[in-house]
Amino acid sequence: MANPVYLDYNATTPLLPEVKEAMRPFMAEAFGNPSSSHLHGVAPRRAVARAREQVAELLHCHPDEIVFTSGGTESNNHAIIGVCRALRQKGSHIITSAIEHPAVLAVCAFLEAEGVKTTYLPVDSHGRTRVSDVAAAVRPETILITIMHANNETGSIQPVSGIGELARRRGIVFHTDAAQSAGKIETNVNTIGASLLSIAGHKMYAPKGIGALYVRRGISLTPFFHGAGQEDGRRAGTENVIHIAGLGKACEIATRDLEKQVTQMRRLRDRLHEGLKECGVGVRVNGHPDERLPNTLSISFHGLEANRVLEEIGLDVSASAGAACHSDGVDVSHVLLAMQVPGEWAKGTLRFSVGRMTTESDVDRAVVAVSDAVKRRHPY
């Protein structure tokens, strides 16, 4: 039996062969500590420096503005908590949106227990934050705006450039979670106007357990980890050289192939959507029709339960549900709730996300499997 078609690249990605090769030396002969002054530390130290340059090239920033972390969650925690504690004398109000990843929303909830006030902005029917709502939420004590670059469920791209310009004019730090956008669309910190930006390696064909935080020159954060002062004193702990080398190579590949990959992913995503429509399956697409990640298709089937559909297609397709069904009812994702997607549609939501390894035959196989499963569950 053939393996299921993998259409869950927004959840995680496989390692690229070039990434594995970049990591290999640091699992064997080049095992030294990059902080060591002797010969064994030279190759690891150079690898960390090179990776910092590769990440900086992807984000269009200076290498010294990159801090390596354990992933997107740590990057978000470091950015948000670090700003709030560094600027606590200036104010204690932050602005975010209702559709952020839990790695942002949970941090805001944590800080509320320390007295930080948070404004959670609504989104429109396409799942996008309005710049005018951000402007209206600003207070004299606002010190941070944190709005994601692109949503992980719907793929809707947020108006980050407008928000970044607003933050700059008001003298407010702007952080964006770019875990889902980096490597899929242009992620230029200067165009975005970000003071801080988070990326996650495992969303872009690098290992799990590695990420980076962009910190614009002049932005002060309280240290997240305390210790020997690695990462220029911003993140203590011996560097994870193996994974850092992998992240650097993944960023280099993303920079090199971005335009080609955007075209390829959009073509495959649209082929999946059109195929489902042609099979006579009634569907609703969630997210902005144009301002959306090229690889992401959030689609709802009226009157169905997403988990039941996933059970039916499990041997053929790997995807994610936008709602969890259990004995007490259906828990719809906070993103779909914020978008006010009607319940009869929301509970039948699946997210498909294509990637570098996806082929046309994969998409065609998925179209048949999904449409057959939906028709069995709810004939049209």
Image (spheres, grey):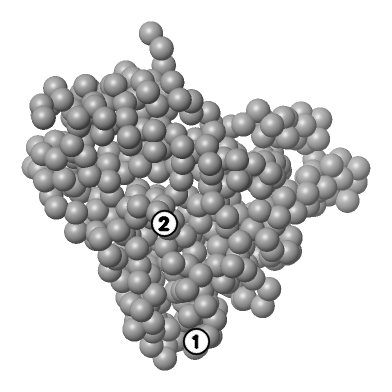
Residue 236 visible: no
Identify the residue at image location x=41%, y=16%: 3
* Residue 18 in the figure: left or right of residue 326: right
Identify the residue at image location x=27%, y=41%: 299
Name the element at disc 2. Answer: loop
Residue labelled with disc 1:
170
| Quadrant into which the C terminus falls | top left
| Quadrant into which the N terminus falls | top left
Residue 139 visible: yes
Q: Which mark is residue 327?
A: none
Q: Position of residue 190 (x, y in %)?
A: 62, 68
* Residue 377 in the figure: left or right of residue 139: left
Disc 1 crowd, CA 10 A, few/some/many (<14, 14-19, 20+)? some
* Residue 380 in the figure: left or right of residue 120: left
Identify the residue at image location x=70%, y=34%: 23
Q: Position of residue 177 (x, y in %)?
A: 48, 59
Q: Please, what is the three-letter code of the amino acid marked with disc 1?
A: Arg
* Residue 288 in the figure: left or right of residue 308: right
Residue labelled with disc 2:
291
